[in-house]
Image: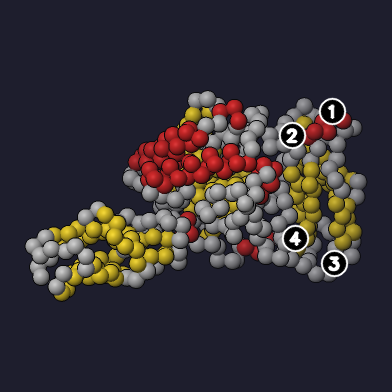
Amino acid sequence: MPDLDLTYLTPRKLTVQRNTVNSVMLFWEPARMIEPIRAYEVYRDNSLLTTVIQRVYTDNNVKIGGTYQYKVRGIAADGRLTPFSNIVKIYITESPGIIYWAKANQYSGYVRGTDVSKYTPELDWRRIVNDGIKFAYVRAGGTKLYTGYDPDIMAARHTVGIKSVGLPVGFYFIPLWSSQDYDINKAKTEAKKYADHIIGLMNQAGYNNYGDLMPLLDIEPALSDVETGLVPNQIVSWARAFCDEFKLYTGRTIMIYTNRSFWEDWGVTSEINTVKNLPLMNAEYYEFNNYLYHTDTPVNFGGWKGWNIWQYTQTAVIGGYTRMDASWCRNLDLVMPPSSPRNLTGYNISSMTVKLAWFKNREIDIIGYNIYKDGRFIAQTKDDFYFDRTGLQVGSTYRYMVQAVDMYYDVSPAVPINIYIWN
């Protein structure tokens, strides 16, 4: 019998959708982000169908013309049963209609990735690569209440493993979003510690940069009993300060990781969202929600007009490993800084005139090139050449630098050239 004392753990938002001609998929959400639930019972037409650990189930035994009702309930760690979820009903038509979107996207040409943390054991990354994964994010660290930046104990192992097989790697950081330890100044301190830690992790893998992919700031509730207790403006103000400081300190642009339900629960509207100009990694899991709509992708929220990465599940099987996160990315150009301009040349082509020229970058998100002279920014151009006619003196040598800029104002390493003015 259900235990009414466990009402607060009742599974919620059960949905059902067509998967194939002869199957449907059930999705539901947990009552809480952290819950003492060890499994779920799935019922069809009031009869126990199966017991599962994940919050998703495929019923492969439905027939055209049939009508089916489903409900689920949780099994607590001590064996007690929660009350049932809401009941959902589906009629099986001859046509399955829109197919489950994760399957539809397998052939979309998108790039598939994953992410790992201290909760992920050490992996054989050759198996991951052989299963089609093209990029990976690593949890660099989080925040401990009152003590600040807390490095992830598995970050170095994961980073070295990922780079050993040649995958692009990025990093994410999860602050402790809590009014108990809220301080805008700490946002700047944490940003620098995050950046320094990334450099250290990449050094251990034999590289010296801030990762191949855009670093992430993870905006989601703490996976603990700590209450957020923050008003919407506090959340976005802290995030903005963090991202600005990281950009100032490293030159790299931060990407925001969050979820529409987090935004709505916290009451962060597009009007007050001060980080909506930054790229987005949208976490919309098929286990929790039905996001088919008309585009097979999540709906926009918070003022963002799309997403750069869509984390669509946390129960993927990748390389034989279960319960893995999986994501789609339209094109890795959208989450990586530009490459350096190639074949830079420069000449004193006529009296008091310098011409710089280079090969255009091939990335799809390039908006132009920054030009520097003797360490000072002098111009930005959309062309693959630039003429400088200002402040030149015969007999002097000037050091020019050119760097590519993308639509998120991430920049490439600058390419230098020295030019002697002879006429």
Q: Which residue is mark 2?
A: 37
Q: Which residue is mark 3?
A: 93
Please tell me which of labels 1 and 3 falls first in the chain.
1
Q: Which residue is mark 1?
A: 5
Judged from the image, the secondary structure of the residue bearing numbered disc 2 is: strand
Judged from the image, the secondary structure of the residue bearing numbered disc 3 is: loop
- Residue 104 picture quarter: bottom right
Depth order, front residue of 264/378: 378
Asked if residue 191 lies left or right of residue 111, the reply is: left
C-alpha distance separating marks 1 and 3 = 40 Å
**Dots 3, 2 in contact, CB < 8 A:** no
Please tell me which of labels 4 and 2 falls first in the chain.
4
Depth order, front residue of 170/148: 148
Judged from the image, the secondary structure of the residue bearing numbered disc 1 is: helix
C-alpha distance separating marks 3 and 4 = 12 Å
Judged from the image, the secondary structure of the residue bearing numbered disc 4 is: strand
Q: Which mark is residue 19?
A: 4
**Dots 4, 2 in contact, CB < 8 A:** no
Image depth: mark 2 or mark 1 in front: 1
Q: Specify the amino acid type for callout 2.
A: Ile
